[in-house]
Structure formats: C-alpha cells, structure tokens
Amino acid sequence: MAKPWDLRVTVDTVGHDSCRVRLRRLTPDGSHAHLQVRAGPLTVYVLDPAALTDLASAWAAAQVRAAPLLPIQLPVAAIRHGPGAAYPIAEVVVEGRQRWNIRPPQNGQPHLLVTAGWMSVRVHDRVALDSQVRAWAEAAAFGGRVFGRRRTPSFDHLLEQAQIAAVREAAARDDRRADRNVGRDR
C-alpha cells in the first residue's frame, strides 16, 4: 500500500466571489450522487451527508463567531492584465466526518481561519465570509434532495446550534472570570 501524502490546501478569500452548488452523478442510473460546491477558487466534492453536515456546521459557526469581527470589505487593488492571466483553483473531495475548527480574528491574526480536515480557508472580510456561507447554505438545502432530508439538517438549524454553542462558551468564560474574582475578594 502506498504511503499517503501529507497535503494541505490553503485558500485566501477577499471580497465577493461567485458560488455554485451542483448535483453530480457518477453513474448513468443516478446512483452515487454527490454535491459539487464551488465558492471562489475552491471546489469541494461532498460525497455523503456526514461531510456536508460537518462543513456546513463549520461555516455556520464561522458566521456566528467571526462576522462581527471582520471588516465589511477590504479595498482590493485593480488587477492589470497583460497578455494573459492565470488563476489558481483548488479541488477537494470530502467523505465521512470532518474535523473542523474556527479561529476568529484576534491580535496578530487579522483574518478568520476555517479549517476542515486538511483544508484551510482564510477569510479576510465579511463580504468574503458571506460568499462562503451562501455556498454552504445552498449546499445544505440541496443536500436534503441528494442525501435525504432526515440525514441532512437545514442550515438554519446549524446556525441555531452555533449560536447556542457561542452563548454557552461566553457563559463559561464569564463563570471562570467570576470564579477568579471571587478568590481575590476573600
């Protein structure tokens, strides 16, 4: 068996990007359907509902935890095209559960970092975040038709769960601060 490669994909997003979600079928009889989710230079082939739920959950959490911390839109310099142009793209295939993490902007890191599996997306402004979130909201809606509604939660449900988790995290932080202050007062 060949040794797997340790590959990592990192994509930077700034400003508005187009997004598209398409149903793909591997066989003429329609079996093995999956989703193709494209947001800007990143195309993700989602093979099952677990991967779709995890990635959509990551973007729902990113929307809840980082949207207020990002600038609305970064000024982007006009690109001068010479005789030709080249644009990098990345394609990723995901299947099964995907570990994900959100790192909101903070000191020394001006961008939002969304990591899922070995794929990282650095989001530099709120317009770019909206493009990514729109793609994954469409994918979650489309996923109900492809994988079955019972197997794919709605994006609204994922946003609600992310908001509940954010409130719980904030309450836990406040409790820890209060516990430290109580010890000093004695």
Image (cartoon, rainbow, N blue to C red):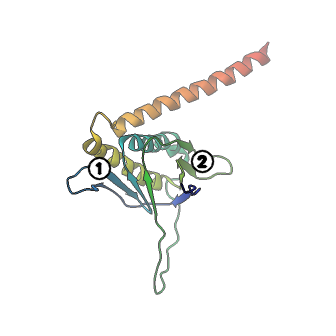
Residue 98 visible (yes or no): yes
x then y, percent, for residue 129: 46, 51
Q: Pick the residue in front: 171 or 49.
A: 49
Residue of label 2: 105
- What SS does tag 1 mark? loop
Residue 123 visible (yes or no): no
Q: Residue furthest left?
A: 29
- What SS does tag 2 mark? loop
Q: Is residue 170 above or below residue 185?
A: below
Crowding at label 1, few (<14), some or many (≥20) Cα neighbours within 10 Å?
Answer: some
Q: Pick the residue in front: 66 or 97.
A: 97
x then y, percent, for residue 143: 30, 44
x then y, percent, for residue 120: 54, 53
Residue of label 1: 32
Q: Pick the residue in front: 110 or 11.
A: 11
Q: Amino acid at mark 2?
A: Pro
